[in-house]
Amino acid sequence: MARKSLTEMVADDLLDRIVAGEFPPDALVPGELELSSQHDVSRMTVREAMKTLEAQRILRVERGRGTFVNPLRSWGSLHAVLRAVSEGEDDDAVAIQLIELRRMLETGACELAATRISATDLDLLAGQVEQMRAAHTANDVTAFVESDLAFHDIILHASGNIFVAVLFEPLHRILESRRAETSRVPEIQANAIAMHESILEALAAREPEPARVAMDNHMTQTREDLQRYVLQAPKS
C-alpha cells in the first residue's frame, strides 16, 4: 500500500474531525496557521489539504469569512459520505436513503439477471436461502448477514452489467453494518427469507418483470421492517 503524503494525512485528519462532530455542518474550521502548527507541516501543505476537501465539496470557502463545513448532502465524494455514515452518529434519514438507493439499483439488476443468470448461480442462490433459514433457526446473526449479502451479490454479478457490482462494492461495509443491526430482529429475518424465496422463484422462471417486482417488494418490506422494528423502537 502506498504511503500517504503529508497533504493526504492532513486532509484525512480534518475529515476525521468533521465526521466525529468536532466541526458540524456550517462550522468554521481552523485556519492554515493553526492547522500547520497542529500537524507540524507547512502552510502550503495545509492549503493543498483544504483544497482537496473543497474539491470534494466537504468544505466551502467564503471570502473574507473563512472555510466552513458543508452539510453531508452537499458532499461530492462517495468515500467520504460512506465514512461519515459508517463512523458518524446514526441517522434515520440516511438508513432510508440507503434503501432507496438499493431499490434503484437492485431492482434493475434483478430484472437483467432474470434473462442472464446461470443454473450454477441459481443453485448458489438456493444455497444462500437455505443457509439463511438455518442461521435464523440457530439465531446466528453473523451467518444470516453473510448469506443475505452473498445472495444479493450473486444477483448483482448475474446481471451481466460490469458497472453494477463495482458501484455496490464501496457500499459493502455500511450494508454489512446496517444488516447486522436489523437482522437481530427475528421477524425481520423471517420476512427476509420469504422475500428471498420469491426473488429466487422469479429468477428461476427467467421472467424479468416478476423478478423486478419481487426485488421491489423486498425493498418495500425492508423499509417497512426498518421503520417498524428499528427506527421507531425505543433506544436502549
Image (cartoon, helix red, strand yellow):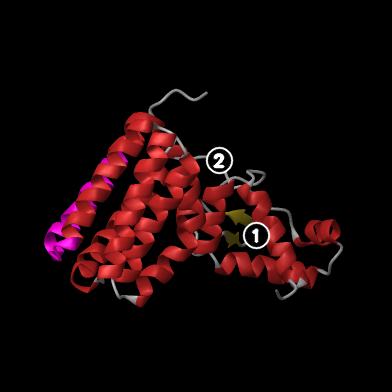
Most foreground residue, 50 or 77: 77
Amino acid type, mark 1: Gly
Highlighted magenta segment, given as a residue range: 204-223
| Residue 233 appears left or right of 129 | right
Instruction: Report if residue 222 lies within the magenta region.
Output: yes
User: Which residue is depicted at the point 87% across and 62% down?
Assistant: 40
31 up-or-down from 229: above or below:
below
Label 2 residue SS: loop
Q: Which quadrant holds the N terminus?
A: bottom right
Q: Earlier in the sequence, mark 2 or mark 1?
A: 1
Distance between the Cα atoms at labels 2 and 1? Answer: 32 Å
Residue drawn at point x = 23 percent, y = 56 percent: 200
Q: Amino acid at mark 2?
A: Glu
Please state if 190 lies on the left or on the right of 142 as rendered: left
As helix, strand or loop, the secondary structure at mark 1 comes to loop
Q: How many marks?
A: 2
Q: Residue at x 69, y 56 (%)?
A: 14
Is residue 145 depicted above or below 7 in this figure? above
Residue 151 falls left or right of residue 83: left
Q: Which residue is mark 2?
A: 89
Say if 193 sits above or below 67 in the image. above
Question: Could you tell me residue 98's position as x and y percent?
Answer: 39, 51
User: What residue is disc 1 on?
Assistant: 64
Evaluate whether residue 68 shows in this view. yes
Q: Nearer the viewer, residue 230 or 194?
A: 194
Q: Is residue 67 magenta?
A: no
Picture residue at 64% right of the left edge, 69% below the top: 51
Q: Position of residue 41 (x, y in %)?
A: 84, 67
Crowding near the residue tagged with mark 1, few <14, some 14–19, many ≥20 C-alpha atoms within 10 Å = few
Main SS class of the magenta portion in the image = helix
